Amino acid sequence: MAELTSMCNVGKELARKLESVGIRSAEELTRTGSMEAFLRLKIRYPNVCLVHLYALQGAIDQTAYNCLPETIEEELKRFSDSLRERS
């Protein structure tokens, strides 16, 4: 199993947070998906923001968080906004 920090956009701090919500490897993050991983993080760490969600998706897609296609960014933003509306 590959370490989380081997993924694009995932540094030690994000890896630590992911591990605290039960995601311990690159494969687990890929299986879980960016939205579910972000939701778990948001519950435990309310201050995570949209950039974290972009970073997670970029990690899965093996691209820099600021190079995601616009359509993906829009979908992720809608998801993030929907979480705020539930609060």
Image: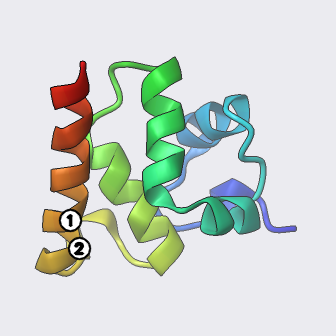
- Among the 4 quarters of the image, the one containing residue 40: top right
Residue that appears at 53% across and 53% down: 10
Type of amino acid under label 1? Glu
Q: Considering depth in this image, is 78 or 11 the residue closer to the camera?
A: 78
Distance from Cα at disc 1 to Cα at disc 2? 5 Å
Residue that appears at 12% across and 76% down: 70
Q: Considering depth in this image, is 72 or 78 the residue closer to the camera?
A: 78
Location of the C terminus by quadrant is: top left
Indicate the colouring scheme: rainbow
Q: Which mark is residue 75?
A: 1
| Disc 2 target residue | 72
Specify whether 23 is left or right of 82. right
Specify whether 36 is left or right of 81. right
Tell me the SS state at disc 1: helix
Residue at the limit of the structure toward the front, as seen here:
86
Q: Mark 1–mark 2 contact, CB under 8 Å?
A: yes
Q: Position of residue 43 (x, y in %)?
A: 47, 23
Residue that appears at 25% across and 59% down: 76
- Among the 4 quarters of the image, the one containing residue 39: top left
